[in-house]
Image (tube, rainbow, N blue to C red):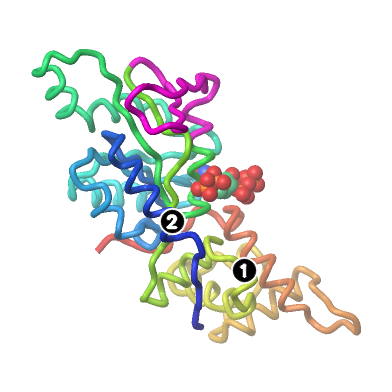
Amino acid sequence: MHFQWYPGHMTKAKRMMQENMKLIDLVIELVDARVPISSRNPDIDELGKNKARLILLNKADLAEDRWNDAWAEYFRAKGFSVVKVNSKKGGGMKSIHSVIQEACKEKIERDRKRGILNRPVRAMVVGIPNVGKSTFINSLAGKACAKTGNKPGVTKGKQWIRLNKQVELLDTPGILWPKFEDQSVGLRLAFIGSIKDEILNTEELAAELIQFLNEYYPGVLEGKYQVEPAADAYVMLGQIAESRHCLLKGNELDTEKAAILLLDDFRNGRLGRLTLEYPQ
Ligand code: G4P
């Protein structure tokens, strides 16, 4: 399967992020807990150098918890602060504020030595499309969403959300695009729905997912759709179509419909909590 994918506004978004980086102390980077490496853009390490760094394993509710823990360890070992979150339901949010203070303790200490007390930490949320940036900002800001408005010294038009006395958040997240010279990265992003389905062959994608699940999560498809294991992924897709009554006129199996159903079930966690890549 070959992807051709040229995100239109990438250069502009990156330039904007570079500008915004000058204003902040902390980068809050969201990754998808199911694919924590594939859902990162490697440019962020360069863009965010000299900043405090917090990685959020978002959609942790959709990934296996033992792997969430393993990934948290992996990133901590690389010097990031890490929190597992479910932005949709608010899971993990309670610890965010204390982790932010911890992640920024050097900056806070530097300020203190210069006699600057109580200057809030300024943070920006970044991540690839669909990783949950808006959901997270809404969940974290909640009702405290009062914008602080423009301030002297801040580029005109920037809006800050005051979360509390200690933290201000830039109200617009930084959007980065995933990078994939490696087709398997593109595939994982397609599985989670981060690449638009219109540019992909749905049945081919579903067949790849079936192959992955048979290898890493044997029994999941059988349990969910009452199908028999088969070496050929397209045979299993046909079985799913049959068991879910995905039929065309003349009772022919509608495997495209079955593919959409399978991908949708996977993306919404209806196949259970599944992790697609593992720390090395
Ligand atoms: P973005 O700003 O980074 O582009 O992402 P956004 O917040 O729009 O979230 C993309 C989708 O991911 C949304 O689903 C959102 O509900 C879902 N989402 C975000 N965080 C989590 C999480 O921690 N767990 C789960 N399970 N889902 C999460 P949607 O299908 O576009 O909308 P909806 O049907 O949920 O309303």
Query: Which residue does the numbered mark 1 point to in the structure image?
Result: 197
Mark 1 or 2, which is nearer the eye? 2
- Left/right placement of residue 82 relative to residue 141 reads left
Is 251 on the left-hand or right-hand side of 93?
right
User: Is residue 97 left or right of 112 when viewed as pictured?
Assistant: right
Q: Residue at x 21, y 47 (%)?
A: 49
Which residue in the rendered view is the most extreme toward the left?
113
Q: Residue 265: where, in percent of width, then height?
A: 63, 59
Residue plotted at (38% across, 67% down)? 179
Quadrant where the C terminus sits is: bottom left
Left or right of 180 in this view: 89: right
Q: CA distance from mark 1 to mark 2?
A: 24 Å
Q: Residue at x 44, y 51 (%)?
A: 175
Q: Is residue 203 above or below residue 84?
A: below
Instruction: Say if the magenta span includes residue 151.
Output: yes
Residue 267 x, y percent position in the rendering:
58, 57
Q: Which stretch appears magenta?
A: 137-165
